[in-house]
Image (cartoon, helix red, strand yellow):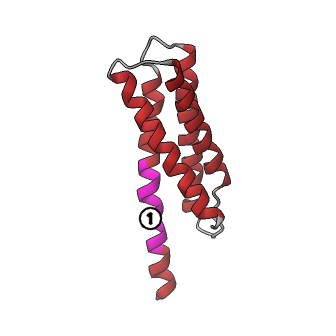
Amino acid sequence: MTREKITDLAVAAGMTVIVVMAVLPLLDINEMWMRWAFAAAAAVVLVARFIQRYDGDNIRIQRLYRMNIVAALMFAGSAAMTFYNPGTNDWLALLLAGAVLQIYAAFAIDHEQAKNNNDNNK
């Protein structure tokens, strides 16, 4: 397996755990192990995002990869907030902000890479 495939799998697994652990407290299932699982998944996503690199010359794609790192930092901050204020839902703000950045960056990276491929084929 290549480094890219491993980091993609780590991000996918981490994001899946984050989503599951974020939904459970909203259903009034709030256990301490869930906070630890959320924090571990956020750490996995953060490490994987730091490992992912874009080696091309497109500055916009480089910035979008950095935006993924900022989103992962927001997930880690959200996980930290579950320990700091366990009775509140303040952690949702950072989680949703990170999710919005993540979704935007994913679509924008695909768009920019497709545009680069079209420019290179001409």
* Residue 20, x across and y down, in percent: 41, 35
Magenta: main secondary structure equals helix
Q: Is residue 68 above or below residue 26?
A: below
Figure quadrant of residue 25 = top left
Q: Which residues are magenta?
A: 103-115
Q: Please tell me which residue is depicted at 57% across the width and 44% down the height of the picture.
A: 45
- Return the residue nearer the eye: 22 or 85: 22
Q: Is residue 71 above or below residue 66?
A: above
* Residue 82, x across and y down, in percent: 52, 20
Quarter of the rendering occupied by the N terminus:
bottom right
Amino acid beneath label 1: Asp
Q: Is residue 33 above or below residue 99?
A: above
Q: Please tell me which residue is depicted at 42% across the width and 30% down the height of the picture.
A: 22
- Return the residue nearer the eye: 3 or 68: 3
The answer to whether residue 113 is seen in the rendering is: yes
Residue at the far bottom in the pictured view: 122
* Residue 42, x across and y down, in percent: 56, 37
Q: Is residue 106 left or right of residue 60?
A: left
The residue indicated by pointer 1 is: 110
Q: Is residue 21 magenta?
A: no
Q: Is residue 55 left or right of residue 22?
A: right
Residue at the far top in the pictured view: 87
Q: Is residue 106 magenta?
A: yes
Q: Is residue 20 above or below residue 26?
A: below
The answer to whether residue 64 is seen in the rendering is: no
Circle 1 residues within 10 Å: few <14, some 14–19, many ≥20? few
Q: Please tell me which residue is depicted at 54% across the width and 55% down the height of the picture.
A: 9
